[in-house]
Amino acid sequence: MAVIESTETALLYRAAPGGADISRSDFAYTQILDLLLSGRLVSGAVLQERRLAEMLSISRTPVREALGRLESESLVTRRHGRMLVVTDVSVESYINLLDMRCVLEMECAARATGRFDPQQGQAIADDIAELTKVVEITPAHHWAVDDLVHGAIAEAAGNPLIANAIRDLRRRTHIFNTSRIPHRLLVGASEHLDLLHAVMGNNPERSRRLMGRHLNNVRDAIIDFILGRRRS
């Protein structure tokens, strides 16, 4: 297992991207996730709370919380009821997840067109505009607005089972937030606004096309991020 030097650990713990303080749990989550995405923790590797806590120079409680988050995102799995191991984190697996999202969300965008509440759409558009004005945007803030867009479109499509499936797929790709692909922030906001205007219109095929383009752009950014980390 890779070791993070104590001085580097202290610096990383004191500040998140943009200079914002982060909790021990968030710090542990970020560091373990980076080890997974970079390939330094390989598929099938056993994750031990004590060893990870020693490596990160923190207590076991935040490590346990971080591992719980990673398990909920299907990045680590349990064997024999207790042992946590690294799930296969491959470019192909994320392509498959995003492909599923693309199929479902493109259809939802088409179905939602003409059924989307204009007042709700305008309120979400205002939230997007406010987000772009914030100097230091936290990943949680960005995710909340991102969730509004995709969640509202999925729900407007009228099938709660599909909406739940999309919610699960989004959770599993949530790790790629703006702290990892920051260049997507403003571009993504523009794409979201175009999407909202489309679903508030009357052209389902345009909504379908814009959702597909948006998710393909997200996919390309994720692939570039993973490959870049593994080359470094």
Image: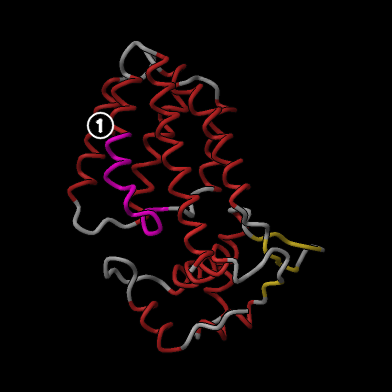
Residue shown at the point (55%, 28%) measured from the top left: 103
Q: Is residue 51 magenta?
A: no
- Check disc 1 and give the amino acid type: Ala
Q: Position of residue 24 (x, y in %)?
A: 44, 74
In the picture, residue 120 is in which quadrant?
Answer: top left
Bounds of the magenta segment: 177-191
Q: Position of residue 58 (x, y in %)?
A: 50, 83
Residue shown at the point (26%, 39%) measured from the top left: 128
* Horizontal side of residue 175 vs 193, given as left or right: right
Whether residue 38 is situated above or below residue 205 in the rendered picture = below
**Which residue of the protein is positioned furthest toward the right in this rendering?**
80
Residue placed under numbered mark 1 in the picture: 123
Pick the quarter of the image with the N terminus. Answer: bottom right
The kind of secondary structure element at disc 1 is helix
Whether residue 178 is situated above or below residue 119 in the rendered picture = below
Q: Residues within 10 Å of mark 1 (few under 14, many from 20)?
A: few
Residue shown at the point (66%, 67%) measured from the top left: 42
Q: Is residue 178 magenta?
A: yes
